[in-house]
Image: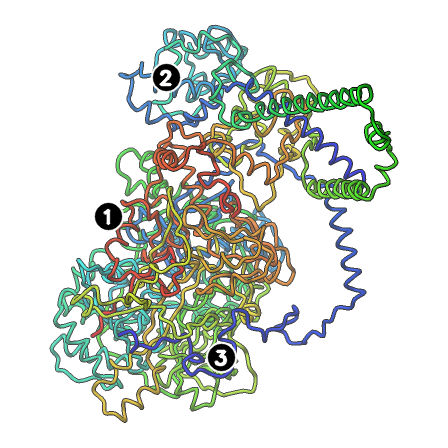
Amino acid sequence: MQDRIKYWKGIEELENAPEFEKHAHNEFPEFLPVSESNAEGTPATGKTHRRDFLKLLGFSMAAVSLASCEAPVRKAIPYLNKPVDVEPGVPNWYASTFFQNGDYNSILVKTQVGRPIKIEPNNLSSLTSYGTSPRAQASLLGLYDNNRLRYPLIKNNEADWTKVDKEIMSRLGKVNGKVAFVSSTIISPSTKQLINEFGSRFANFEHVMYDANSSWGLLSANGGVIPGYDFSKANVIVSIGADFLGSWVAPIPFAKQYIQTRKVSSENPTMSRHYQFETRFSMTGANADVRVPIKPSEEAAVITAIYNAVTGGGSSAASISNAAAVTAAIKELQANRGKALVVAGSNDPGTQAMVTAINRALGAEGTTIDVAAPYYTKQGNDPQMIRLINEMNAGSVGAVLFYNANPVYDHPLSEKVASGIKKVNFTLSFADRVDETAALVEYVLPDNHYLESWNDFEPKKGYLSLSQPAINPIFTTRQMQESLLIWSGSNTDFYEYIRNNWRKVATGDFNEFWEHTVHDGVLENGTSMLLVNTNVAPAAPVIKVIKPTGIEAVLYEKAVGTGDMSNNPWLQEMPDPISKATWGNYVAMPRSMAEEMQVVQGDVLKVTMPNGGVIELPALVQPGQAPGTVAIAVGYGRKLESMPVAIGVGANAYPVATVVDNTVFFTGPVKLEKTDAVIEIAQTQTHHTIMGRLIVQESTLAKYKEEPKSVTEYVRIATHEGPAKPATISLWDDYEYKDHHWGMVVDLNSCIGCNACVISCQAENNIPVVGKAEVLNRREMHWMRIDRYYSSNVDMETKDLGVVERYDKMEDPADNPSVIYQPMFCQHCNHAPCETVCPVAATMHSSEGLNQMAYNRCVGTRYCANNCPYKVRRFNWFAYPNNEKFVNINTTMQTDLGKMVLNPDVVVRARGVMEKCSFCVQRIQLGKLEAKRENRRTKDGEVVTACAQSCPTNALIFGDMLDPESQISKTLAREQGERAFHVLEELNVQPNVTYLTKIRNLA
Amino acid sequence: MISCILRTKHKIVVAFLLALTVSFGANAQGASEQADVAAKGVEPGATQGAAAAGDAAAADPAVIDAGAALFKNNCAVCHSAGSDVIVGPGLQGVTDRHSDAWLHKWIHNSQALIQSGDAEAVAIYEKFNKQAMPSFPFTDDEISSILAYLESGQGASTSAAVPTTVGGVPGTEPGENIGTDAIGAIGPYLDIVLVVLIVVLIVLVVTLLLITSLLKNYLNKNRQLNEYDNEVVNQRFDFSKIYKSTPVRVLVGLIFIVVLLDLGWDSLMGIGVSQGYKPTQPIAFSHKIHAGDNQINCNYCHTTVYKSKSASIPSVNICMNCHSQIKTESPEIQKIYRAVERNEPIQWVRIHNLPDLAYFNHSQHTQVGGIECQTCHGPIQEMDVVYQYSPLTMGWCINCHRETPLNTKGNAYYDNLVKLHDMGSSGAFTVASNGGTECAKCHY
């Protein structure tokens, strides 16, 4: 079975381009310039002269001997008055909540002597108990962002809060006209109530919510709320353009529900079947069993066909290129009434109304849709926002306040917003930095970071959570809510305000209830507090057919989201789940279009947007992109001084979005024009190649049900006694493990490719960010990567075709490949090839099965990286800390403020040493110590690596393989001979990481 | 450079002498109760299990032990378990003088009780010079265990001075002090063997010389020797022959080079080793007065030494527990007050500096390992000014890990490991045999 599937990491590998082939075999590509002036051109002539060399040698000798005689005086500064619950060296944990643009996570914040240093999932939350999103992990950096405003601004001049308050209170008293409060979605019950109270003193007040990535269509079709989807109850999931695992509505809760239907075992070999009709290749599409690329304009046809079929209104076959898949989907939906769910990403109210009708007809309400518990994570009202923009331009707005909103950047009518702001007498922004909108307003009153604030949340009806400050405000910033309270003349602070508000839902003694709730971070007793505008007339199920003109472009959220996390280097360098591109956006186009336009990857295209604006972006040939369409990510093209990390990265694609009937569509027609320029795209995908080996394994559910032992291919070595397991023929003696034997199981069925583990690992292990130039040089430092393999099953797709057509078809596997994700990190081999080649024994095996790396012993020969079959070792080509070259790239290691995020239990590595995944040995050591302190053995689940802890789908299981009761031991015992396999088993390196074969529920 | 080398050399000699002294004196150094305390756990919460048994089991030795540990680490600085007054009253019979509920309230927050106007509380406050007792966040079970300990009268028999530990060498059975015993175990025998060997050699040389002269005398007197034999028997010892001979010169040259290399090597190895580092601190704090003369438990000031990787430098509020009353006129103490007034923390000079690449955890060594503070920090109770006692080199760490048997007694974590070890080896179950010399135990 395996030999029929061809895996490839990128187009260049599929086509075996000569340039690719030349470097494929090298661990370190030698074409790279060795001097530091690499990416920017100017080849260095750098030859060192003998005299210079001697001078340098002499100087460094002198410096070393001088420095060695006197050690610098180091201070030990204790607290003046130590807080009772802070113990230096012992972390404190606080329950809190991260919410940004629909991305909701109930979290725990780890603080060391008052500094938040890590975000972990809050297991008490039933919505997001498994793990977090990558953005929640990376949100930590926002706290230590040097570019946040440190004080309020009045007309761009520094001011103090008393002056600000005095001025604003007098100005607000004199407002002439409407007072508008513009924000993105607010799911905080207390904040919303406070805004309403604040507004009640004005004659004409309006709270306008809008979302950059709007779900207005969905809201207006469902009475102002988002239906309480429950993917865990669905046998058949049909998604039409909804990236529900990545960026749609509430991705982390959805991922948790979804994965419950995707985990299989031989006792319970059932899986949901997931159909995905979409334009761009999304992460959700990558996880689908059947993925069909369609144009945005074809969505209507698909939905209409399903609507007609399930509501019995006649069955017209969809007039799209792959109608067979639609028919199959309809058949399955009808066969699974009550266990089916249809979701759509479209923002057209009519389309969404049809989807609602489809779900109702399928009996989804009460089963796969919890009617009583809708989601509140998107509440943005497009018509209201557009009306406000018009009112601002008409001059009828007297005051406008922006909170968590940056419409000058992220609204398709940004020019009108900018012109409107100029006509408003009193303008104010609560932005944490001078962003595009804040630059145009009179007052900028920086809000606290969420880790410095009290707040409450209700992402889903009846699911409440709190956030509490984990640190005092670093700068003289003030929470928006505090300002509103002061301007309302109230004496209570926002903490008291929330407390008073929560008395409504309290049971028993309030103080006790409150302590308990703050401790847990969540309250899920069914009570609801959030005021939501449900006074929305349901849209009629009539699809607005948009006539395609030219090339259809779709917008989507990449790592940095809608743009408010653009200044976050961790996210900038996080590879996209599909394209594996870091740093910046690009025009993702199908291969057919690239061939037609004679464009190769990296060629700069002039993109003419619907509003006439022109941006220049490089092209990326994206397998699986629907023919005749392109996809561009939003959130880039920032030119702000306050976002130095994002300067010069990509271009702003928001103007591609179009406004039709007062609704914002994330699609639009564009014109593309090839230019002569080239911008290289920093992709990590082909940095480590497969060389045609058996690395990743998959099979089908049908086969798994039939014979679980048949799904995985085990390599056997030919001996004179017949085929033998590689492990039985060994040159080495085996290690004997007495205490612990740490290992990891990676369930390829559960991994959705979201990268939360990558960022979590980066935060935990002080991994530097290297920047676009160095990623291009293949020098990214991530200890953990998620390999994305494209594959095309030639046999499956061609069985109905004639010989000639079959050959024809085989030439185009890149049109709609399948994707399989494989998290890859140090495999901690028991017979590690890296250990035997190190000339200084800097890497060696521990008595607990770990492959240890002693940085201070490493001399940088890089033999180990050359000898590693998994390509997981990373070399410090530069001194990343305190290096001007990385000042706006690796922000965590340059300034005192940035360095606060570093994990004090892990060393920052120096230049010239090798590093790699350590299985979070600092956590292992701590876990063992805790157990020893309490005179007991470690408990399963107590020692968990950062990646496994933050995985939102529990795809990674870490534990002690010597403990027969541990989850990992049980899983391994169950899956042995069925799905469990080692990557490259034939090398007999005997990894401590085991993978479980991916099972697809193919139609 | 030269002075640098000389200094290091000097230090090494001193260190060697010290090491000798330590190895000879190791057996004399008895174990202290601190190891005991450490093994049982000192932090609030550690006793929960024991105390959970409730009041019915008040006489349960586990509860009393837990209470004793808590008492020593939290109360003993100001109270004796007998009847003497230290700062606060002696606590013998305190459970008879006050009700249980009242005591719980008082320990939790004495100030609140005084402010509430409680007559008993105010009376005590007045009687002891309005010296406020700090609040303790113990659980009720923990307080009960302390009271059970006081009631048992175990602590009352000891004298008023806190029966600790720091440097104090109360007579306890040898063998409990795991850390130093191991180092000492082979030391004295080795020395004795050496001395015996040297004596034997000297006796041998003297005997040989005697035999030679006897034989020579005999030959000269009793035998007719020919010229050749006479020359051989009565040859004169010519020193010039020795220093002119090539092998001797080569040998001496080699020794000279080896000594030079050794000196050079030692000085290079001494780079970055700041053993004996004794900086002047902003406040002339004396460990001798506090830990030595007044027997204050280390844990009283270095509050996290049993629970954290860092032992922590005491914050000013800990100083003020006593110094709000004691020696208020001293110019050094006044520095503390100034720090409080200016709201600026005191900037102590850090003495023990491990490089970033080495991870060290105090609680692993103190609580789990049962190691004395003095094992690494030296006779801290005698230091007026603290200096770095140990070299803090990797060799020093590793050596201890190789030689120190693990403190496995009563720790369920090690039960199976000890069994496995005893099956496979007859040697001691040292830190190293449990993987304690592996890189990633300290470097990550």
Q: Secondary structure at mark 1?
A: loop
The image quadrant that residue B332 belongs to is: top right
Nearer the observer, B117 or B391: B391
What is the chain identity of the residue bearing mark 2? B
Vertical placement of A860 versus B203: above or below? below
Say left or right for A453 vs A39. left
> How many circles with numbers are drawn on the protein?
3
Is the image coloured rainbow, by chain, by secondary structure, or in one colour? Answer: rainbow
Q: Position of residue A857 (x, y in %)?
A: 58, 51
Please check whether the numbered discs 2 and 3 fall on a single chain: no
Q: Position of residue A144 (x, y in %)?
A: 54, 52
Nearer the observer, B346 or B417: B417
User: Which is more foreground, mark 1 or mark 3?
Assistant: 3
Q: Label 3: how many residues lie within 10 Å, few (<14), some (14-19) or many (20+)? A: some
Find disc 1 in the rendering and name its residue. Answer: A526
Look at 60% across and 64% down and name the residue there.
Answer: A641
Q: Secondary structure at mark 3?
A: helix
Find disc 3 in the rendering and name its residue. Answer: A20
* Mark linked to residue B64: 2
